[in-house]
Image: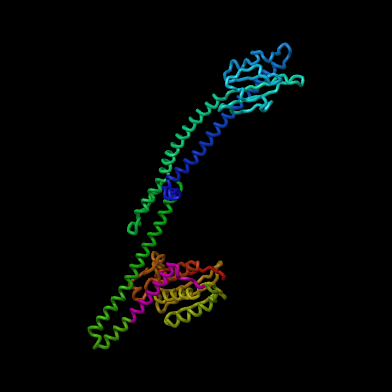
Amino acid sequence: MRMNFFKFTKISWKLTLLYASIFSLVLILLSASVLYGIKFYLVNQSLQKVKNISNTIAERIVGPTEEKMSLEDPELIGEARTDATVSVRIANPEGILVNSEDSFHLKKIPFSSSLDSVRKTESDEMHLAIANRQVLADGKTKAYLQVAVNMENEYMFLKVLFILMACADAVGIAISLLAGYLISRRMLLPIDRITKAAQSIGINNLSRRIEVSQADDELSRLAETFNEMIDRLKQSFDKQNQFVSDASHELRTPISVIQGYIGLIDRWGKEDKSVLQESIDAIKNETSGMTDLIEKLLFLARGDSGNQKLQKIQFSLNELMEEVCKESHLISSIHDLHCDVAGEIALTADRKMIKQALRALIDNSFKFTPTDGKITVHAGRGNNTVNIVVEDTGIGIPDDEVNNIFNRFYRVDKARSKESGGSGLGLSIVKWIVDAHGGSIRAESTIGEGTVVAIMLPQTTL
């Protein structure tokens, strides 16, 4: 039950209990130290008192002849007669009691008990400081002396002091609980605000932010970090919504075209073979485009989810470049494509993906470069990098559009891209591949002169 209590208690109470426990422990230890110190002082004072009285009486018994006092002389124990807390007993060498002032029945303690000692003892529930002494003169026993001081007043004082300090400690602990709770609540109030603000933030309300105080403390940094997390979440959610919206839009057009031609076949294609063939060709073309789009969407989805794994091997970039250029020539022989590699380059990467990226860049240059234009692909070594540059003399991209060409579904000219068969995903896939390899990609372009896309991949080994 106790473990469950602490498990489900609020942090404010946990802090309060922790603070109060530490404060109580310190307060109790301090009070105990004070009580022990005072008790030690008072007991020592009483022990010193009985020692001094016993020394005085012994000096009177064995002192100079003119100062000697007989054992029966009442003045010998004058201190006991004037101080109600002092008792004295004197016995002759035979142990017979000859003089005494016994205020509290001291005779119950025998003379033979701890001779020549000063100690604290208890008798009949009384706290006593007692001195037993054998008085000697010329090597002979002159008397037995016993002096006691009743410390009941001192112990009563300690008892009252204990009660007062216990009450003061109880009040102090209660105040510490109250103060600890108020302080912890005040300290944790920003966390409550953060919690309420976080609870109010939902998918449809990602624009709300937590108010950050001006104080440079842990709670302010927590609020700032939470706001930054919400910013990233909103950006991701917006990109996801945009991605779904763009994908839906891209798929809607070919589906509409296919539905249109199916209707055309249903009405006239059964009898008119030319209409039937036109419809079949159009449906095949749109289906091919949809297949390509879906494959690209799946590639990016696997990449975003972390399921698109790299299969890194070491291969010859020279051979890959030659292979890509030959295939590209077969796809489009009307463009002037030139590929070269500066020296022999061994690259450690996913060969299939690097080939996919190169083909996407070359294919993009084919789409937007006139037939009399030139496309150059060059590879070389940099500072611990392998650099691949694809340059064309195509129509170019406006300066304010260059930084957006790697965004998904982005098209500089949507009508022109549609005519060329672009989906706006090719360069996004290229950027994902480069980023997955720990590289970087940048583009520069001038309207009417062409575009340069540069890839820099780290030169690593398996």
Characterize the magenta stretch by its predominant secondary structure. helix
Furthest residue to the left?
Answer: 267
Position of the C terminus by quadrant: bottom right
What is the total number of numbered labels drawn onto the structure image? Answer: 0
Please, is residue 139 above or below residue 168 in the view? above
Please, is residue 147 above or below residue 381 in the view? above
Residue 309 magenta-highlighted: yes
The residue closer to the viewer here, 125 or 207, is: 125
The residue closer to the viewer here, 312 or 146, is: 146
Residue 16 magenta-highlighted: no
How far across and how far down the image is residue 137, in percent?
74, 19
Q: Is residue 135 left or right of residue 168?
A: right
The residue closer to the viewer here, 323 or 18, is: 18
Tell me which segment is drawn in magenta: 284-311
The residue closer to the viewer here, 413 or 172, is: 172
Q: Is residue 379 left or right of residue 189?
A: right
Whether residue 438 is visible here, answered yes or no, is: yes
Whether residue 452 is visible here, answered yes or no, is: no
How far across and how far down the image is residue 25, in percent?
51, 39
